[in-house]
Image: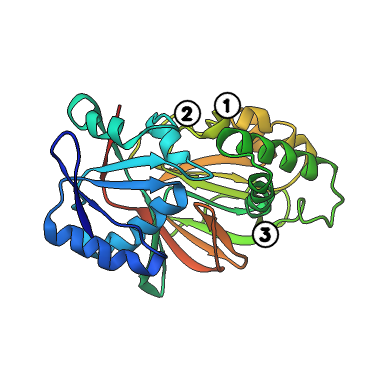
């Protein structure tokens, strides 16, 4: 950890972790030094790793965070309204001239082991998992951020619309959801009752490529969108879903959005949290700590 003086006479403690295993020690040093701010240079995966590794160190009392969106996907930065080319100098200036936005991450833990917990902002399962794999192929071809997300959404829709019944893009995933009171989240009855075609959960409201599936609610609300089946009549309404427009006909066809502070998820297949896959199991989804972010 090397102190560096910047032009504004602020002392910057620079750290470059080799991998995720280095983060707990680095964050412990920051906590011991009682730093005023923590700067994260990276994308959504970097934010997920820092929040997860720092949960036992900072708990509910994180210092304000500054995100420099340098990753392949930067959904949090889009929601915060950060320029994708935001520099460290501009971010430090914003400490004095900018504002503070509050966000709460998702806290995802195993129900039989609460210590096995990760934190992030965007969770998806079912067809979302296949879509992320498609997005990674787009990244390899140089399509990042909004372009990569746009290609992923369009490609996923085409695969689901024109794939055969046994195609991975049209299959449901065994999963069951329960609200904070233990009541099972209602299923439309279209398709298998113990399956959903797609699950998407986040506390964010704005996403890359102009996606806004959750128009209502605030930054302290966990919202979950579910498609019960891959019926083509429902998939053709995807442009309305990603703009947050829900009709009664869409609900009857098997699309719904629920808001809750807590959800139990039983899933047999893996799910994705901020770009990384996690194994199936019995999980508790809840709201993480109230985090403060410096914005322009």
Give the percent coordinates (x, y) of residue 168.
77, 56
Q: How crowded is mark 3: few (under 14 residues within 10 Å), some or many (20 or more)?
A: many
Q: In this view, does 292 lie above or below 84?
A: below
221 left or right of 26? right
Q: Do the residues labelled 1 and 3 touch (CB within 8 Å)?
A: no
Q: Considering depth in this image, is 133 or 139 the residue closer to the camera?
A: 139
SS at badge 3 = strand
What residue does disc 1 label? Answer: 245
Instruction: Using the numbered discs, state the Cα–Cα distance from disc 1 to disc 3 in whole angstroms.
Output: 25 Å
106 left or right of 230? left
Label disc, if present, on residue 215 of the rendered structure: 2
Give the percent coordinates (x, y) of residue 68.
37, 40
Q: Quadrant of residue 125?
A: bottom right
Give the percent coordinates (x, y) of residue 147.
62, 33
Instruction: Using the numbered discs, state the Cα–Cα distance from disc 2 to disc 3 in whole angstroms.
Output: 26 Å
Q: Considering depth in this image, is 19 or 183 the residue closer to the camera?
A: 19
* Residue 244 shows up from this direction: no
Q: Quadrant of the N terminus?
A: bottom left
SS at badge 1 = loop
Q: Is residue 217 above or below residue 106?
A: above
Q: Do the residues labelled 2 and 1 touch (CB within 8 Å)?
A: yes
Q: How crowded is mark 1: few (under 14 residues within 10 Å), some or many (20 or more)?
A: some
Q: Residue at x 48, y 45 (%)?
A: 71
What residue does disc 3 label? Answer: 173
């Amino acid at each position: 950890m090397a102190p560096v003086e910047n032009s504004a006479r602020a002392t910057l403690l620079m750290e470059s972790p080799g991998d995720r295993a280095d983060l707990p020690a680095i964050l412990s040093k920051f906590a011991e030094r009682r730093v005023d701010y923590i700067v994260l240079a990276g994308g959504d995966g970097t934010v997920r790793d820092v929040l997860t590794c720092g949960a036992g160190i900072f708990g509910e009392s994180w210092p304000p965070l500054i995100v420099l969106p340098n990753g392949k996907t930067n959904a949090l930065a889009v929601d915060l309204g950060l320029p994708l080319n935001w520099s460290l100098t501009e971010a430090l200036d914003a400490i004095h001239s900018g504002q503070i936005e509050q966000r709460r991450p998702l806290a995802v833990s195993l129900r039989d082991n609460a210590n096995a917990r990760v934190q992030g902002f965007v969770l998806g399962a079912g067809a979302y998992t296949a879509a992320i794999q498609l997005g990674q192929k787009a990244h390899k071809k140089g399509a990042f951020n909004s372009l990569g997300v746009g290609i992923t959404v369009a490609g996923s829709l085409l695969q689901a619309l024109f794939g055969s019944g046994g195609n991975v893009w049209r299959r449901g995933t065994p999963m069951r959801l329960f609200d904070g009171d233990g009541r099972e989240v209602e299923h439309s009855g279209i398709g298998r009752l113990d399956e959903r075609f797609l699950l998407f959960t986040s506390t964010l409201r704005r996403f890359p490529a102009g996606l806004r599936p959750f128009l209502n609610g605030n930054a302290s609300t966990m919202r979950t969108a579910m498609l019960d089946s891959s019926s083509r009549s429902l998939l053709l309404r995807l442009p309305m879903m990603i703009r947050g427009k829900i009709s009664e006909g869409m609900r009857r066809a098997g699309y719904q959005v629920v808001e809750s502070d807590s959800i139990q998820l039983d899933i047999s297949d893996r799910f994705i949290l901020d770009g990384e896959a996690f194994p199936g199991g019995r999980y508790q989804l809840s709201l993480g700590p109230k985090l403060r972010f410096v914005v322009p």
